[in-house]
Image: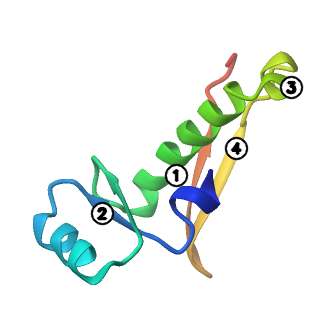
Amino acid sequence: WIDAHVDHAVLVCVRDHALLAFCREQGDRHHVVDFNSTVERITPWLASQLQAEIDATPGLRDRKVRIMRLRVNETPNGWAVWEAEAGR
């Protein structure tokens, strides 16, 4: 999923009309999201997207595979961490 949708792509907020138009005009690889693409917002979104892919994969779904923690680095010294709620 990552390779197909967001690897080497710009995450563009649907409300950022100027950036969206620029990406389209330039033919730049981009993925449209409904939030400002800060690492703090990307991390839970990415966890949700990946969990949906896991849930749609029979072998993983049948084994009840769950993402428990995800860390997304923005810089070598800056990142955000998402953790599953207890009991999930």
- Check contact, mark 4 vs mark 3: CB within 8 A: no
> Closer to the camera, 40 or 1?
1
* Real-space Cα separation, disc 4 to disc 1, in angstroms: 10 Å
Secondary structure found at label 1: helix
The percent position of residue 73, horizontal first and vertical second, equals 59, 69
| Amino acid found under the numbered disc labelled 3 | Gly
* Real-space Cα separation, disc 3 to disc 1, in angstroms: 25 Å
| Amino acid found under the numbered disc labelled 4 | Arg
The percent position of residue 85, horizontal first and vertical second, equals 61, 26
| Amino acid found under the numbered disc labelled 2 | Val
In this view, the mark in front (3 or 1) = 3
* Real-space Cα separation, disc 3 to disc 2, in angstroms: 33 Å
Residue that appears at 28% across and 50% down = 35
* Real-space Cα separation, disc 2 to disc 1, in angstroms: 15 Å
When the figure is inspected, residue 84 is found, relative to residue 22, above or below; the finding is above
Q: Mark 4 points at which residue?
A: 69
Q: Mark 2 points at which residue?
A: 12
Image-based side of 36 in relation to 11, left or right = left
* Real-space Cα separation, disc 4 to disc 3, in angstroms: 21 Å
The percent position of residue 18, horizontal first and vertical second, equals 12, 72
Secondary structure found at label 2: strand
Query: How many other residues sit within 10 Å of disc 4, few (<14), some (14-19) or many (≥20)?
Result: few
In the picture, the disc for residue 59 is: 3
Secondary structure found at label 4: strand
